[in-house]
Amino acid sequence: MLGEFPTGQRLAEEQIAEQLEVSRTPVREAFVRLHADRLLRRFSDGGYFVAEIDLFDLRDLYELRLTLELRGITRADEEGIEHDREALLELQDEWLAIQRDPPEPDGSFIELDESFHLALLRSSGNLALAETLETINVRIRPVRTYDFLTEDRITTSIAEHLGIVEALLNGRIQLAADRLREHIGASLDVVEQRAADAMRQRALRSRSTREG
């Protein structure tokens, strides 16, 4: 998830087992799980390598993510359904604290970002939606790290999170939905551009190595 293993790199069971100080069995089981999650691909000889970025798949997953999260927000438009106000207030306090002392811009911010969106979805009262979002997060996490590499993206994301929560606390469901749609759309734009740039750079480095 942190990019320590470049895309396309073959992963050796023995080497990783030594690095993690475990036997090869859990490493082998992890490979199978990561392959099922499409984070690894398999060579014809049975070995595994880190999956390349699929921008078409990424768009589809972002669309599914947006659908899930919008549903969580708009459930409150239905009679008898309300968001958990206490949970939203706790979320607001948490992100106000983060805004006062923002983290350094790097891919690790994704953990905070995911926790926000999951907490927001759980506040809708439909935990199945949140569970499904977690499975989507696993598949898009490797490329979503590209979203949080600059200070302005961290600052903007924090402000957008607070704007969504504020709208929900004020009962402005449609405004919250609009803000969420813009927030996720902006994230997709950044991720697609930076992922495409990274793929081009890897291709150039690979060609340079072959020619050298």
Image (cartoon, grey):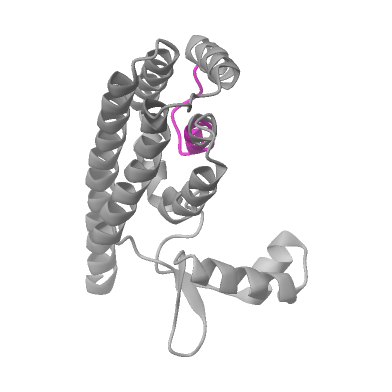
| Residue at 51% in and 54% down | 4
| Residue at 28% in and 55% down | 60
Specify whether residue 5 is in view: yes
**Residue 17: x and y, percent?**
70, 68
Vertical order, 209 against 144 (above or below): below
Task: Give the farthest residue toward the front.
Answer: 79
Vertical order, 121 against 25 (above or below): above
**Front residue of this view, candidates 46 and 61:** 61
* Residue bounds of the magenta highlight: 102-117
Task: Judge whether residue 113 is colored magenta.
Answer: yes
Task: Judge whether residue 43 is colored magenta.
Answer: no
**Front residue of this view, candidates 33 and 5:** 33
In the image, 182: left or right of 128?
left
Is the C terminus in the top left, top right, bottom left or bottom right quadrant? bottom left
**Residue 55: x and y, percent?**
26, 57
| Residue at 77% in and 72% down | 23
**How many numbered discs sit on the rendered protein?**
0
| Residue at 55% in and 23% down | 84
**Residue 140: x and y, percent?**
40, 52
Vertical order, 179 against 51 (above or below): above
Q: Quadrant of residue 127?
A: top right
**Residue 101: x and y, percent?**
53, 13
**Front residue of this view, candidates 189 and 174:** 174
Specify whether residue 149 is in view: no
